[in-house]
Image (spheres, grey):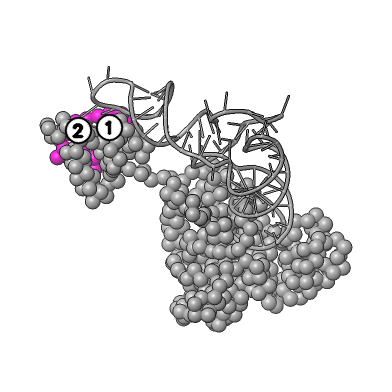
RNA sequence: GUGGGUAUAGCUCAGUAGGUUAGAGCGCCAGGUUGUGGCCCUGGAGGCCGUGGGUUCAAAUCCCACUACUCACCCCA
């Protein structure tokens, strides 16, 4: 074989693309009910968008981006996440001039990060995400979370954990950061090597460390939730009230720290414990300063990204199957050239009428045609042979009931259509 | 970027005191007498045993290197 799919990429084969399509159908339906409309933005953007948007200190920007120079000398980057491009488009197209909020979604959007692949982590993966601009209050936070949970619920997934947290705003976070850093500096002996680095670059990240000694150090550290300014505390209370009202269970996890710099106030994750180490199926939060930072007006925003591949892993691990559509409604078994032509004609007509019809392309024996039809899961098999051609009658077999009847060839198609109703 | 594991048929895997033509199940194809699927039976196709070196009379099997895949760290969806 000449070459293989690049490391960290995966083909979606015909045997599984039906699952993707089913999920996409559900997503579109839910988004319509919640008033979110689709936006499609380029797969690549100017690199500076992500430098400014995602943040120069993040791992994503520092070591995971697919960046290259195009033939015009521009620095281009394949999008490493979905939000920055949507915000750019929101600003560029002056969508802020419309009545707010602006509620948009993107679906199965390819996202690229140069990482070592492992279970639930690819170099190209696909996200469903939503973004809501312009609404400052916590009700929209709750609505955004509801969209994600609604999708999971519709797919039959009930037992994933929703964790929420608030990481404050530009008023209260700097002083908290300073306090945390001070605490860490006083406990340097009780921290792992990478946390000693994090302490300098982004102290919040130490909260997320899984090392035992770091966790103990962090336990005694000041807590962001208790250091929130009045406005942030009120916002977080409001979110909890809305979630309670909607009957949504959640856990407050003060250790949630998202890896993108633009988050403010509300952050949340929906996590599975049985798809390997990469258990975050959905992650998001509020980004109140991002629109302005990318050159737009001072408008708040909130959104999430949800990984389709990880969602499929969850479905698989829970043993949940999605409804599958039948590959073929009716198969025409034919014997001989004349009959094959008649079958081809009948199939063509049925297809025009929206019926999934198939006939032989492999020169199979009658028996083999039947086997193949059964494999396709056909409801009906029609048989046309020399006898049928001679007397104008065809055999129509119901494959599930194993019942046959003889009908005039001229009435075959209408008979099939009636049976499929 | 750092560790661990694995590479044999389309898929899932057997196969070491090194020793004839490398196996199974599933899948695929063809049959089980005249034109009928699922179950069962029979047969067939399909493998430079990841690649390149080395040891040996002899290597899928032992040694080395490389590559790919995979899991985990990190990070994230």
Please check the rendered image and state whether residue A411 is part of the magenta-colored stretch, yes or no. yes
Instruction: From the image, tell me which residue sits under label 1.
Output: A366
Characterize the local packing of mark 1: few (<14), some (14-19) or many (20 or more) Cα atoms within 10 angstroms. some
Residue B54: quarter of image? top right
Compared across the picture, whether A421 is left or right of A123 comes to left
Q: Residue drawn 49% across and 80% down?
A: A72
Q: Residue drawn 53% across and 80% down?
A: A73
Q: Chain of mark 2?
A: A
In primary-sequence order, the first of circles 2 and 1 is: 1
Q: Residue drawn 25% across and 38% down?
A: A332
Q: Is residue B43 above or below residue A292?
A: above
x then y, percent, for residue A90: 49, 76
Residue A183: quarter of image? bottom right
Q: Is residue A302 visible?
A: no
x then y, percent, for residue A85: 52, 72
Q: Residue drawn 30% across and 30% down?
A: A367
Secondary element under disc 2, as helix, strand or loop, is loop
Compared across the picture, whether A418 is left or right of B66 comes to left
Q: Which residues are magenta?
A: A398-417
Relative depth, front residue between A391 and A99: A391
Characterize the local packing of mark 2: few (<14), some (14-19) or many (20 or more) Cα atoms within 10 angstroms. many
Please check the rendered image and state whether residue A303 is part of the magenta-colored stretch, yes or no. no
Q: Is residue A275 above or below residue A173?
A: above
Q: Which mark is residue A385?
A: 2
Q: Chain of mark 1?
A: A
């Amino acid at each position: 074989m000449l070459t293989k799919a690049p490391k960290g990429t995966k083909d979606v084969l015909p045997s599984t693309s039906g699952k993707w399509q089913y999920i996409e159908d559900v997503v579109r339906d839910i988004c319509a009910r919640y008033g979110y409309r689709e936006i499609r933005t380029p797969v690549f953007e100017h690199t500076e968008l992500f430098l400014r948007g995602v943040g120069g200190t993040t791992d994503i920007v520092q070591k995971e981006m697919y960046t290259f120079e195009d033939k015009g000398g521009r620095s281009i980057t394949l999008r490493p996440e979905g939000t920055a491009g949507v915000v750019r488009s929101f600003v560029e197209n002056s969508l802020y001039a419309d009545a707010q909020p602006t509620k948009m979604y993107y679906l199965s959007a390819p996202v690229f990060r140069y990482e070592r692949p492992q279970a639930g982590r690819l170099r190209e993966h696909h996200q469903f995400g939503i973004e809501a601009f312009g609404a400052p209050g916590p009700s929209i936070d709750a609505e955004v979370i509801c969209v994600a949970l609604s999708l999971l619920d519709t797919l039959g997934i009930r037992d994933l954990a929703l964790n929420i947290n608030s990481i404050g705003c530009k008023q209260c976070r700097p002083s908290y950061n300073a306090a945390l850093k001070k605490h860490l500096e006083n406990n340097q002996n009780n921290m792992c090597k990478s946390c000693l680095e994090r302490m300098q670059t982004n102290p919040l990240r130490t909260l997320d460390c899984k090392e035992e000694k770091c966790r103990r150090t962090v336990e005694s550290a000041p807590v962001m939730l208790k250091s929130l300014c009045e406005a942030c505390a009120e916002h977080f209370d409001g979110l909890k009230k809305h979630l309670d009202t909607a009957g949504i269970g959640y856990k407050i996890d003060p250790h949630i720290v998202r890896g993108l710099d633009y988050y403010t106030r509300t952050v949340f994750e929906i996590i599975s414990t049985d798809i390997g180490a990469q258990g975050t199926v959905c992650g998001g939060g509020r980004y109140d300063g991002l629109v302005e930072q990318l050159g737009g007006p001072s408008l708040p925003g909130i959104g999430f990204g949800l990984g389709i591949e990880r969602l499929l892993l969850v479905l698989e691990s829970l043993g949940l199957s999605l409804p599958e559509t039948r590959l073929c409604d009716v198969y025409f078994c034919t014997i001989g050239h004349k009959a094959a032509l008649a079958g081809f004609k009948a199939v063509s007509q049925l297809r025009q009428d929206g019926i999934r019809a198939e006939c032989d392309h492999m020169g199979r024996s009658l028996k083999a045609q039947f086997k193949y039809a059964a494999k396709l899961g056909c409801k009906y098999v029609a048989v046309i042979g020399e006898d049928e051609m001679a007397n104008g009658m065809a055999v129509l077999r119901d494959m599930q009931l194993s019942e046959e009847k003889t009908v005039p060839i001229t009435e075959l198609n209408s008979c099939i259509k009636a049976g499929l109703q």
